[in-house]
Every structure is written in C-alpha cells, then in structure tokens.
Amino acid sequence: MSYDDVEIEDMEWNEELQAFTYPCPCGDLFQITKDELRMGEEIARCPSCSLYITVVYNMEDFAAGSDSTSKKGLEPSKQQPVAVA
C-alpha cells in the first residue's frame, strides 16, 4: 500500500536529480523522473527506505515531445472560446 497520494503539483523538480521529488518521512526524497511519468509510471520511490507514494498527474502533460520541467507547464491550460455558427 502506498504511503500517500501526492499531486504532481505538490512535488518539486530537482535539476540535479532530473526528477520530481517529495520529502519522505525518513529524511530523504521520493523520486520519479519525467521518463517514468511518460511511460505511465505513478509510483515515486524513496531510495533510502521501503516507502513509496502514488503520484497523481495528467499523463497528457508528459506526452512524448512535451518537456515540462516547471510547475507552470503542469497547470491546466486556459480554455479558449470557440465560435459556433
């Protein structure tokens, strides 16, 4: 069972690790890479203990060709008005 469910927006991008991170109770960080997210992975693991979290995210934000590394890129796009004839 997952330790917790965490929204991707609540995680931080770590440039050094090239991964989204979230604090683990053991003092280390849960980690998940953009490549893992693109493949549909939703489990971020802590390298120092046995805990893991379920990452809640929209897979479309990480589709091939998309390179969102900031929280801005993860926010929902604003809807555009559509003209109806």
Image (cartoon, rainbow, N blue to C red):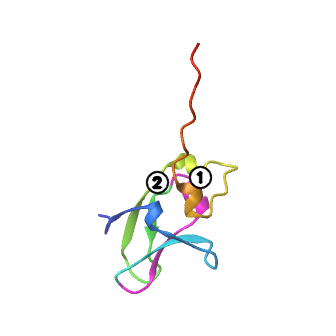
Provide the residue span drawn in magenta. 26-40
The amino acid marked with disc number 1 is: Phe
Horizontal arrangement in the rendering, residue 70 relative to residue 22 (left or right): right
Above-or-below relation of 11 to 39: below
Please name the residue that numbered disc 1 is placed on.
62
**Furthest-bottom residue in this view:** 27
Check residue 17 for magenta coloring.
no
Residue bearing mark 2:
57
Could you tell me which secondary element the residue under label 1 belongs to? helix
Quarter in which the N terminus is drawn? bottom left
Question: Closer to the N terminus: mark 2 or mark 1?
Answer: 2
Vertical side of 47 occupied by 61: above or below: above
Q: Secondary structure at mark 2?
A: loop
Q: CA distance from mark 2 to mark 1?
A: 9 Å
Q: Which mark is residue 13?
A: none
Callout 2 touching callout 1 (CB < 8 Å): yes
Q: Quadrant of residue 83?
A: top right
Neighbour class for label 2 at 10 Å: few (<14), some, many (≥20)? some
Q: Position of residue 53 (x, y in %)?
A: 38, 67
